[in-house]
Amino acid sequence: MNRRLFLTAGAAVAALGLTRAGSAATGSFEVTRSKAEWKAMLSAAEYKVMREEGTERAFSSPLDREKRTGMYHCRGCDLAVYSSQHKYDSGTGWPSFWQPVSSSAIGTKVDRKLLLRRTEVHCRRCGSHFGHIFNDGPKPTGKRHCLNGVSLVFKPA
């Protein structure tokens, strides 16, 4: 199955609401907020993605088309997590990177919501959901960090 067919099928499943909503990464984080505090600081779309592990529509984020030099920060806690130096156009409709700014900027966990095993990526400081990591990215890592733009804030250099 090619990646575009898989993404289309996955988007259809998500659009039909057949995915089970999760929650942001659990554990001990430096930045913690109550559910009410998160809801007060985030839009409904941001909350759904960052705190309930939702997915924004493909091609809906202006960050997918962002070409300037700079850093991408977690919207939840302002931690610098991805650099424009590691960004590339994956053609999937989501901002994609081949590595984070450092391995200590992110956390990962296993995600089985779409009936297959995926690697979910989140902020290591506040646990906010960013997206997923796939093994079909460019060299040198071969990884594609496929992220939701609503989880990030771009800061130009």
Image (tube, rainbow, N blue to C red):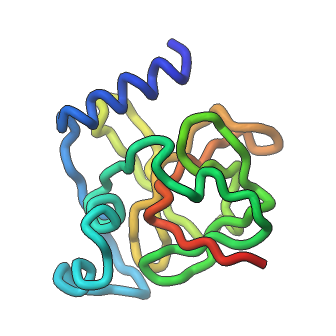
| Image coordinates for residue 130, horizontal then vertical, percent | 46, 59
Coordinates of residue 133 in the picture (x, y in percent): 54, 45
* Quadrant (top left/top right/bottom left/bottom right) for the C terminus: bottom right
Decide if residue 29 is on the left or right side of residue 42: right
The foreground one among 12 and 21 is 12
15 lies left or right of 89: left
Residue at 33% from the left image edge and 86% from the top image edge: 32
User: Is residue 25 visible from the viewing direction of this image?
Assistant: no
Establish if 151 lies above or below 13.
Answer: below
Depicted 37 relative to depicted 51: above or below: below
Q: Which residue is drawn at 58% across and 74% down?
A: 73
- Seen at 72% across and 76% down, the residue is 156
Residue placed furthest toward the top: 1
Task: Give the tally of numbered discs.
Answer: 0
Judge from the rendering whether residue 37 lies leftward or rightward of residue 87; answer left or right. left
Q: In this view, does 146 lie above or below 1?
A: below
Residue at horizontal 66 percent and vertical 42 percent from the top: 143
Relative to the observer, which residue lies in front, 69 or 19? Answer: 69
> In the rendered image, is residue 56 in sight?
yes
Q: Where is residue 84 in the image (x, y as percent from the top left)?
A: 74, 62
Q: Quadrant of residue 115?
A: top left
Give coordinates of residue 44: x percent, y percent: 25, 67
Which residue occupies the foreground of this view, 59 or 147?
Answer: 59
